[in-house]
Amino acid sequence: MDGNSDTTQGNHDKRVADVGFAGISRRNFLKGSGAFLGASFLASSAVVAAGCASEKEKAPASGTSDNSSSAATEFDTFSTDVLVVGCGIGGTLAAVQAYKEGCQVTVVDKGPFKASGVTGMNWEAGVYKFGMIEGRGNWVDGFSNMAVSAKIDEWIGTSLEPWNLALTFVRLGSSSLRRNEDGSLYEREFDVEGVFSRHAPEYLGTHTDIDVLDNTMITGLCISDGICTGAIGVHVPTGRYRVIRAKATVIADGGSTQMFGWSGTGAISINVPDNTGDADMAAFRNGCSLIGTEFFSSDMVSIFPPAIGGSFAAGIGADAYSTQYVMDNQGKYFLGADSEGHYLPITTQVAQAILDGRGSEHDGVYVDLTQPGAAEQLRWAYGRNIEMWKNTFGIDVTAPGYKVEIGIEAFEHMGSPVVDENAMTQIPGLFNVRGLGNMMGVSPFLHFLPPYAGYSAASYALDIDDDNDSSADWASVEEEIMRLEGILNAGGNKRPHEIRHAIQNAVYGAFHVGADADRLNTALAEIQRIKSEDMPQMAVTNKTRCYNTEWRMAIENVNLLELSEATLQASLMREESRMFFFRSDFPETDDENWMANILVNYDNGDFEYEIAPIAVQ
Ligand SMILES: Cc1cc2nc3c(=O)[nH]c(=O)nc-3n(C[C@H](O)[C@H](O)[C@H](O)COP(=O)(O)OP(=O)(O)OC[C@H]3O[C@@H](n4cnc5c(N)ncnc54)[C@H](O)[C@@H]3O)c2cc1C
């Protein structure tokens, strides 16, 4: 059976989308008594793809909000048992598990279905290569939330389901693991043409009838009496608002690294540009504490020539498979010849070397791909880009004497709403596949925290009485639509991309060679300046609603700016170094004082920071 998606036009006969159109007054919008379109009309409508609104819909099916904008603001409503925001590996695992528990599930993704998110690497490299199933603590350095870990252990102890799901994805194919005929696993030769496997979302599409609303950016939450009753967002191709009502909602919107640097083609990050923490920050603004904001996970990527550096799509990286070829400006390799796989400490060493004057011209170091076998080691797009650099730009990185200049890049960011032992955030009904506050974020639990979040969300949803419709409070929907209309219609002299670059430059200035108090304070001052001077001037010059990427960037800027502030302030507080987190003014790990989490709380626009103990069993 095919999954129901906006792009694949699924045919689930019981679920239909309600088509929004003008004609509902502000009063009716708020009261939820606006025009209601019956299912028979909807089923025959060709306007919106098959979705997931229930025939029992009681809230306004569609309408316009009466706000200061001259344009009508149209919205469509959908309803489901469990809503999952994000369709990477985390979201897919949560969605499939909730579906297996017997729930109607809807996944919303900002990108195109099966082609979005980082997806997929964790459950092979993370779990198998580094043995994370057995040793969950190994990359998290004791930071794991052991309360949720114990609950997960209890849960997986009762069911083979999560293990089977993980192995199913491996069997379907992965970018480095294959099976021998006898079923045993082997690591295949690197395929330089290969990019990330996306077998998890493919499985979702072929083995379930989960509904997928793709190209839909969630920006806000539906909150009713302090309970999460779904989410609100924009269908990017049309600009129509979408309100997805859900008994339980799971956030899975990935690692928000896009505030880290700028290099002509994008952020100095190999994470996907879609991940800007929109759902995380919506939860934050509704009272969820963020955890782990001070932690980026980093490796290295080319930073020169800048127009083709700094990105996964066009850059050349030095990740786990090529760190042994990373050298300083004197030709000294950071790691010895037998050091393949020694991954974690190198960005700290590199930052220190740059501070010591052993860096490259543009505040990086070098990777030497002229060594025998070095170029062949490069994985994914990096390998492919060797040819692209050569053919398109005439740069042969394997030519004798050539060294690729690389800088520290952020491939993950840990800031996410904190979860309890049920993977639920501080808002009842809102769950999160991340939110542990550990150094690798989702990695060590990847097989298990996301499906556990899906399981928990499903249990919560199945407990809610169908007849007890608690989602009649449309104030949060109206408020969010007003906010987005405000962003679209504001006048000013700052384009969203200028503000994005200012944020990226500030954050990069603080972290690209580790951090210290001076650089963190400088960056914080710049973020405060952007907040008070630039943001009130941010103007979307293109007012169209169809694929308005400028509007989208402006909405994202609000989130990235807030996340940047939380990241910088929490980093300033953490006076130690730990794993990827490197304070050059506090280079030692300080377990005595800092085996603790920093929570960021939101209070009417003010941020408050709180040191919290790591949750133990
Ligand atoms: C280049 C690279 C290499 C890596 N290599 C490894 C490795 O070798 N081993 C390893 O263990 N880990 C690796 N990682 C880390 C690992 O891939 C990630 O931790 C993991 O894939 C994250 O999964 P996720 O589902 O949380 O996020 P993602 O896969 O990024 O999914 C997030 C999803 O949320 C969607 N989304 C974002 N915002 C919104 C919104 N507002 N509304 C709706 N949807 C939204 C996005 O479109 C996306 O589909 C790597 C990461 C990168 C970037």
Image (cartoon, grey):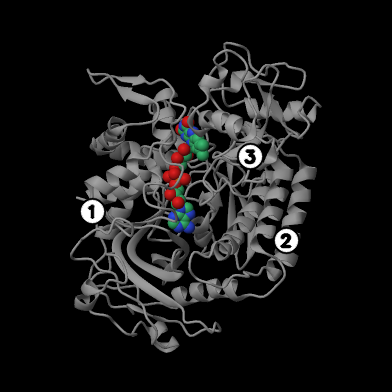
Type of residue at label 1? Asp
Asked whether the residues under the numbered discs 2 and 3 touch, taking CB atoms below 8 Å apart as contact, a structural biologist would say no
Q: Residues within 10 Å of mark 1 (few under 14, many from 20)?
A: many
Horizontally, is 159 left or right of 66 in the view?
Answer: left
User: Quick one: quadrant of the C terminus?
Assistant: top left
In three-dimensional space, the C-alpha distance between marks 2 and 1, rounded to whole angstroms, equals 45 Å
Residue nearer the viewer, 242 or 577: 242
The location of residue 210, given as percent across then percent down, is 27, 54
The answer to whether one can see residue 572 in this image is: yes
Pointer 3 residue = 308
Type of residue at label 3? Ile
Q: How crowded is mark 3: few (under 14 residues within 10 Å), some or many (20 or more)?
A: many
Residue nearer the viewer, 53 or 364: 364
User: What residue lies at 77% left-to-right and 49% top-to-bottom?
Assistant: 521
User: What residue lies at 75% left-to-right and 50% top-to-bottom?
Assistant: 523
Q: Is residue 77 above or below residue 25?
A: above
> Mark 1 or mark 2, which is nearer the start of the sequence?
1
Based on the displayed image, in which of its 4 quarters is residue 149 positioned?
top left
Residue nearer the viewer, 361 or 478: 361
Q: Is mark 1 within 8 Å of ligand 1?
A: no
Q: Residues within 10 Å of mark 2 (few under 14, many from 20)?
A: some
> Mark 3 or mark 1, which is nearer the start of the sequence?
1
The disc placed on residue 355 is none
* SS type, badge 2: helix
Question: Can you tell which of label 1 and label 3 is closer to the viewer?
Answer: 3
Pointer 2 residue = 530
* SS type, badge 3: helix
Residue nearer the viewer, 396 or 174: 396
* SS type, badge 1: loop
In three-dimensional space, the C-alpha distance between marks 1 and 3, rounded to whole angstroms, equals 40 Å
User: What residue lies at 59% left-to-right and 47% top-to-bottom?
Assistant: 293
